[in-house]
Every structure is written in C-alpha cells, then in structure tokens.
Image (spheres, grey):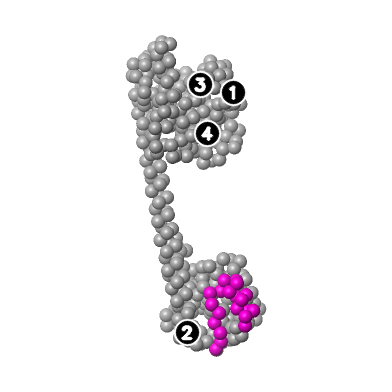
Amino acid sequence: MTEKSKSLCDADTILIVEDNDINAAVLADIFDKDYRILEARNGRLGLQVLETHRNRICAVLLDVVMPEMDGIEVLYKLKEKGILTQIPVFLITGDPNNTVMREAYGLGVMDVIGKPVIPFIVKRRVETVIELFRARRRLENSVERQQSEIVRQAERIAELNWGMIEALATAIEFRSGESGTHVRRIHDITELILKETALGKGYSDEEIRQIALASIMHDVGKIAVGDAILNKPGRLTPEEFEIMKTHTTQGALLLEKIPQMRKHEAFRYAYDIALHHHERWDGRGYPEGLKGSALSVPAQVVSLADVYDALVSKRVYKDAFGFDKAVGMIQNGECGVFNPELLNAFAEIEPQIRALYLNGERAAE
C-alpha cells in the first residue's frame, strides 16, 4: 500500500467551507466528537486548506453562497483536479433550487443538504458516504496489493525461466570445453551494438533487452551434437561439419518444444537467432542459405558477436587471436561476408566491445 493510499484510508478530518460563523459552528458541533475539524471562510481559502491537508480529509461540507469564490466555482476546481472522485463533497445551501442541484450533481457532488440543517440527518448521510469511500479505498488497496504480488510472481517466474535457460546454455559451453562466459559476452555485445549504433534504430529498449536475452540461446542446439565432434581439437571432416551444422536446426526445434518459451516475448527472437546465426550476407551460410535483407538484424548482430568472441577467445581447436587481428579477419571477409552496414557499426563500436574483455577476465588468459 502506498503512503498516499494509506493516508486516504485513515483520513479523519472534515473540512467545513462556510462564511457564516454560526452555520460553521453548527456543522462543526455535529461532527467534532468523532472527527477532526478544519474550517475555511470562503472558497479560495477552502481550496488552499484542501490542498495542504488533502490526505487527512475524509469529507468536505461546502456552502454555496460565499465571498471571493462560491461553492459552485469550488466544485469546478475540484473536478479539474480529480478530487471529487477521491473525497466526498456535500453542498450546503439555503436555496436548494433545481438549477443549483442539477449543476452540483453534474459536477460530481455526493449530496446537496438544505439549510437549516437537521443534525442527526446530516450526520447519518455524511458518515454513510465516508464509510462507503473508505470501503472502496480498502478494496482498491487490496486489489493493488494483489496486482503487485502477481507482477512480482511473474517477474520471479520469468527470472527463473531465463535463469534455467542461461544455465542450460552455459552447461553446453562447458561441455564443449569453453569458459562458461561466452553466452554472457554474446548478450553484452548484442545489446551494445543495438543500443549504441544505427542498427538498433526502430527497436525499443524493451525489444533490445529481449533480443539480448534471446542471444544467449544461439548455440542451444549443440546439445544434440556428440562430444567427439563438439570437442574435437583438430579440423572437422566434411561429414563431421555437416553434423555440427545441424545445431542450428536442432536449437530452433528445441526452443519450439518448450511451451514456456513459446509464450515468452523473446521466443521469436530466440528461434530466429538459433536457426540463422550462421547465415551470411552473401547467401553462403547455413542452414537455409539466406541472403541479404532476408536475414534479420538480430540474427546478423548475434552472428558477428559470435564470430568476434570465438576469434579472441581460446578454443579446443585454436588459440586466441589478438583484438586487432580479429577485427581485420572480420573486415576482410575471412570469417564469411557480413552486411556492410553491420561492419560499419561494428567498427564504430568495437573499442567499447573490446573494453568488455579488457575490463573483465579475457577468456584467452
């Protein structure tokens, strides 16, 4: 419960806005045993008191005819501020004609009370409405608490789901003899490129977050590749390479078979990235040989991030290359052809990507 909501539920003060001292005293006498009383002698002062003590006030008794600002003018101001839906206002008038009553009820006043007031009737009518408003606030606060708890539970479930997925991806890394931090670096590089370069234009911050999360699953299909191929220290034979290539299709199939994943916002990105992160701009990648703009931006970005990290990190089949060497190999097409716009963005952001390694523990060391 927020402090504001709590204050509204605990409000115990009635504001009497009445220019006549005797009438104000009569109204105060009705309620002063059970409520705190605040008074104002005209509409303008009444608004000031209400603004200062808003969370303490549970009802307003408002006279119609007053100097400086009359009761109807005050009602218009209260309606503009949205106060009439939060605090019940009762209009007190010595001339309850149809015109005044119609205008007052139209503005949102809870009741119109005629003068001279009959104390026990006024007390009953006002207190009934006060209790009604308090009950409504308690209900609203209860619903708010329940909604907040549901949101917290959903967030915990989402964190658990992604934690399990990241654990699976990391376990696959260890199985293939990698450091266990590859997926986290791919996540960080993907997020950095999309956030800091023109390639991310058109994606919201939340979409970029989902793409970065999805990137950690790019190699999940390697779970279907045997250890003999996955951990082979030398060059793969053509037959072995064909088996290795199936990790893209196997990864997409695996993600598709997890019901919780299909419902997640990141699923479409994860599926696309797992299936297409080895495609190349010239159509010479795999598994589908997609070419040019047929490749999604997220899949292209993860593809380059994956290549960069593989080059600068030690693997079972190679030592790490230096950063400058890795950049040159990517720019020269030695690792396949990439989108020229992606290469420009990569060149722009590479010093920041390199800093991710230099500021942390480089896999090669």
Describe the element under mark 2 as helix, strand or loop. Answer: helix
Q: Where's residue 107, x and y in %?
A: 60, 71
| Residues at circles 1 and 3 in contact by the CB criterion of under 8 Å | no
Amino acid carrying label 4: it is Leu
Amino acid carrying label 3: it is Glu
Question: Is-magenta flag for residue 307?
Answer: no
Amino acid carrying label 1: it is Gly
Classify the position of the C terminus by image quarter: top left
Describe the element under mark 1 as helix, strand or loop. Answer: helix
Q: Is 30 above or below relative to 337? A: below
Can residue 359 be seen here? The reply is no
Q: Give the range drawn in magenta.
A: 97-116
Image quadrant where residue 317 sits: top left
Describe the element under mark 3 as helix, strand or loop. Answer: loop
Q: Mark 4 points at which residue?
A: 192
Q: Is 91 above or below relative to 170? A: below
Instruction: Identify the residue at the far top of this view.
Output: 237
Classify the position of the N terminus by image quarter: bottom left
| Measured Cα–Cα span from mark 4 to mark 1 | 23 Å
Q: Residue 288 carries which label?
A: 3
* Front residue of this view, candidates 199 and 133: 133
Q: Mark 2 points at which residue?
A: 121
Q: Residue 292 carries which label?
A: 1
| Residues at circles 3 and 4 in contact by the CB criterion of under 8 Å | no
